[in-house]
Amino acid sequence: MLIILGLVLVSSIFTAVRRPLIGIAAALSLWAILPWVAVPAVLGAEYSDTHFHPGTLIIAGQALVIILRVGPKSLYVDRPAGKIVGLIGICLVYMAVVTALSGRGSTLLIDQLVAPYLLLLLIMRAIRQDENSVQILVKFVLLLASVQVLVVVLVFMDIVNQPFASMYTNYYWFEYLADRQMGTLDHPLTLGTLLVVAVPLAFTLKSPMGQSVLTIWLLVGILLSQSRTALLLGAIAILWLVFSRPAGAWVKWLSLVVFGVLFYLLTASNVGQGIVSRVIDDSGSTGARLQAIDVFLDNASGFLVLGLGPLASYEFAQLSGMTTSFESAILMFSIDYGIIATLVLFAAMSILACMSLDPLVKIATIFVLVMSASYSSLSTESIAGPLAFTLLAIAAGHDRANRLKNTTMKLLPEQPPHAL
């Protein structure tokens, strides 16, 4: 396995300048199929705070090669996204300073923020080279999501065992969430995030049949992840997409009825029993989140400007008598890096998400930010960070691709009038 990862790393770096999507796809694939908990075992070493995810190494290698061979200006992002991307970079520099002062959690910062930020710059560069990169990346995200659903379905049907199950035994939540599926990701909510992001992107397919089949497939995965937030966002997306599509009223209502019937059948089957029971009885999940907000507000003045360092929120939760984490990347980042830097970061990310001219891409990017705010996400090692910054890059890149297309159309000579 180590030799294979080495070959992937080397080939991705060598194709960085002219075919950057190869390395980007390789990194995203590794983040998706290799959970962080399995990284030390795969790399043949004991757990250490200095082990970065292989996806991080690929992105760092690509960025370094491009800077050395082409120059740092090649990663420059032009307007209007450039200023927002620069603001995000300033936030990350500040968070790096906080991390250095605290002397802890550097790996988490690099895996979840620094490498994903470099990934965003690489994707934006790839879009400048070829505007079709946007469509390619959208389809690749759909591919990753579809493969994850296949994995969870096979695990749910007891055809295969849960991948890397033995490596999760040290996590207190693994036995507690044994009936929830997570594929090869690091948590069921991470699976829910990837799948609900893919729901609006599924409607970018040209075939209406393909849109419907893929959406139902994604809903199966969301139900098996038992993520209530993902299910709610998925339902909202489907309702909006059905009624906003250019079709007759009877077609829209028929589509809604078909989706409704299929959804009822899924929830009434074994696939949906778990999430239905969680809706009826959340086992204290809502109460834990409300407690987290109360604890945070009572102590907010202590980390208004300067945070306690990465991962400090977990210790702070324990010291405050909580039995869970703060269950929100915004709250956890505020404790770790400071409230002001966190609010500026998420505000900048929200602005970048809304830049896309495609409503489907815009919805998907907003969804990834909403999901990130609803659980630990970016405060844990997983694909959450890379996925969020990939969607942000697609959103900003889609805006640029459309502006380039419109500019090109304006430069084309007008067609002569038809002879009468």
Image (cartoon, rainbow, N blue to C red):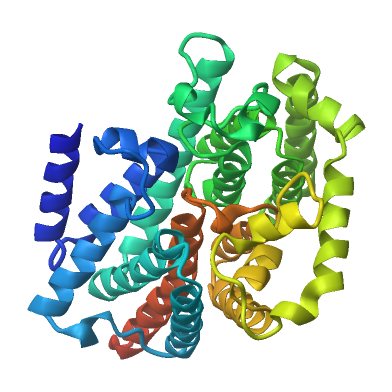
- Residue 103 pos. (x, y %): 45, 70
Quarter of the N terminus within the rendering: top left
- Residue 85 pos. (x, y %): 45, 82
Residue at 67%, 67% in the rendered image: 330
Residue 95 appears in the rendering: yes
Report the side of 296 relative to 187 (left or right): right
Q: Nearer the viewer, residue 137 or 410?
A: 137
Q: With respect to residue 289, does 400 lie above or below?
A: below
- Residue 338 pos. (x, y %): 64, 78
Q: With respect to residue 320, does 31 lie above or below?
A: above
Report the side of 329 relative to 75 (left or right): right
Residue at 42%, 65% in the rendered image: 106
Residue at 27%, 61% in the rendered image: 59
Residue at 28%, 74% in the rendered image: 125
Quarter of the C terminus within the rendering: bottom left
- Residue 371 pos. (x, y %): 66, 54
Q: How many marks?
A: 0
Q: Nearer the viewer, residue 192 or 376?
A: 376
Q: Nearer the viewer, residue 410 or 279?
A: 279
Q: Nearer the viewer, residue 16 or 414?
A: 16
Residue 417 appears in the rendering: no
Report the side of 53 relative to 108 (left or right): left
Instruction: Identify the image quadrant of residue 61.
Output: bottom left
Q: With respect to residue 186, does 98 lie above or below?
A: below
